[in-house]
Image (cartoon, rainbow, N blue to C red):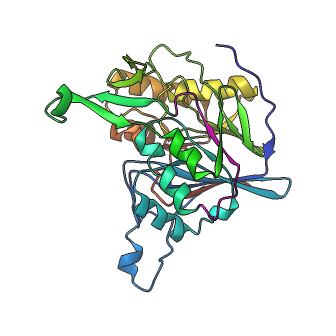
Amino acid sequence: MAHASVKMEEVDKLQVTIITDNYYDCLRWNYKIANRHHKFPDASIWKGWRFHAEHGLSYYIETVVNGKSNAFMLDYGMDFEGVTKNMEILGIDVNKLEAFGLSHGHLDHWGNLIPILEANRNKIRKGVPLYVGEDAFDNKFAKLPPRLYAPNEGLSDLGQLDRGRIESIDRVKIIQVKDPTPIVPGAYMTGNIERVTDYEKGSPILLVKKGDRMERDYFQGEQSLMFNVKGKGLVVLSSCAHSGIVNTVKHAQKVTGIDKVHAVMGGFHLTGAKPEVIQRTIADIKAVKPDYIVPMHCSGFEAITGFSIAMPDQFIINVAGTTYTFGA
């Protein structure tokens, strides 16, 4: 697969805030680069502890380049009420957003996109870009055991993001990317991720409808993010890493020409993976020698535990509401 090379603009400071993720722990205190949410929205401490977590993922990201702050969102979770409440608690200002991004076409990442656009129609400037990969609007399916999903012999429709409805809201301009692409100063989409490992094969139960045919989904259009933090190196941020987190990191190194990896973060999609795949993934990420490793979302208990054992000095457990700060 041929890719355009990209000259990475250095980021003076990078902040990644986890609006929602699978896990929340109000007693998890600040650790290294991770600043946990401990602000309570009203006088009742118990109400303040009801921070929303779900099987979904949403990021609010700020880069600082040459003294100017730039803000955007990547992925949106599923539950509008919960995610919106988290955004209010975290003080996220939709007016500041210069771009929106979507990693791939699964409901737990795009489900809340349209409700956010509709609810903030008067706050989002017209024409703000929405960056997506080539599979963003595909109809996705999963072939799950019939005992869990009885209808259609276990074939579960995972939904399809409605492009026409987004366009009818008349706020964002959809931009489809295949190559590494800057989305705000200092933040880059990876472009389509090259597959180089022999064990990151994706999941055979995940399917996509192409015309009248149902095919195995290889997520050719899945996007991750990459940043070059001044004096630190690459921060690679995935959402699900259906392409493989090792493939994603190696791709970022290749297209940027930067070997030093400061942090690897995001969903690694190792839930239910075979033990040998988890172990090879951990070994290959460890060989990259990142300063921090932060598995989230769909990484799975076994992989998260494995990283914590193999890379104890680099490992940070994620909880919803955490802000990670890189650089000055």
- Whether residue 199 is situated above or below residue 48 in the rendered picture: above
Between residues 308 and 194, which one lies in front from this camera angle? 194
Whole-percent x and y of residue 215?
Answer: 38, 17
Is 129 a magenta residue? yes
Q: Residue at x 62, y 62 (%)?
A: 94
- Whether residue 288 is situated above or below residue 14 in the rendered picture: above
Instruction: Determine if residue 234 is in view.
Output: no
In the picture, the quarter occupied by the N terminus is: top right
Instruction: Tell me which corner region of the image, top left, top right, bottom left or bottom right, holds residue 257.
Output: top right
Is 23 on the left or on the right of 59, as rendered?
Answer: left
Whole-percent x and y of residue 298?
Answer: 40, 39
Is 160 a magenta residue? no
| Segment colored magenta | 121-136
Q: Residue at x 72, y 33 (%)?
A: 181
Q: Main secondary structure of the magenta part?
A: loop
- Whether residue 212 is situated above or below residue 249 in the rendered picture: above
